[in-house]
Amino acid sequence: MSKFINLLPEEEKIRKISSFYNAFSDTTRIKILFLILKERLCVTEIAKVLNVSQPAISYQLRILKQLNIVTNKKEGKSIFYEISDEYIKELLSISLAKLS
């Protein structure tokens, strides 16, 4: 059995992968990601669409940002959020297509 242990990534990489996919386990986070899939939005806009408080949206965005799933850009007094890269966009699109 020990010959198979080499098939596993390093423990730290496994933890990072687990954290990454855990980000997709919350329905509010998934909704946020689909909202910003094609357009940058600020917390206020996301909160209005989802009918969720701004602090709750900010909390979810903080989790997504810590995992490098979203990025933000400040414009004036507003901070706009968007998907961090094409890989995440592709992952969301594939997931939707697979489950539709």
Image (cartoon, rainbow, N blue to C red):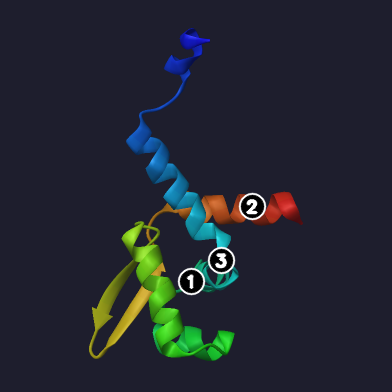
Of the image marks 3 and 1, the number of the one nearer the N terminus: 3
Which is nearer the eye, 42 or 52? 52
- What residue would you read off at disc 2? 95
Mark 1 crowd level (few <14, some 14–19, many ≥20, 10 Å Cα): some
Q: Is residue 40 visible?
A: no
Q: Position of residue 7 (x, y in %)?
A: 47, 18
Mark 3 crowd level (few <14, some 14–19, many ≥20, 10 Å Cα): few
Q: Which amino acid is tagged 1?
A: Ile
Q: Is residue 64 left or right of residue 75?
A: right
- Disc 3 element: loop
- Disc 2 element: helix
Cα separation between marks 3 and 1: 16 Å
Q: Position of residue 25 (x, y in %)?
A: 56, 60
Q: Is residue 64 visible?
A: yes
Q: Which amino acid is tagged 3?
A: Asp
Q: Is residue 76 left or right of residue 40?
A: left
Check residue 26 in the rendering and tell me which mark sits there, or answer none. Answer: 3
- What residue would you read off at disc 1? 36
Of the image marks 2 and 3, the number of the one nearer the N terminus: 3
Indicate the quadrant where residue 67 lies: bottom left
Which is nearer the eye, 38 or 50? 50
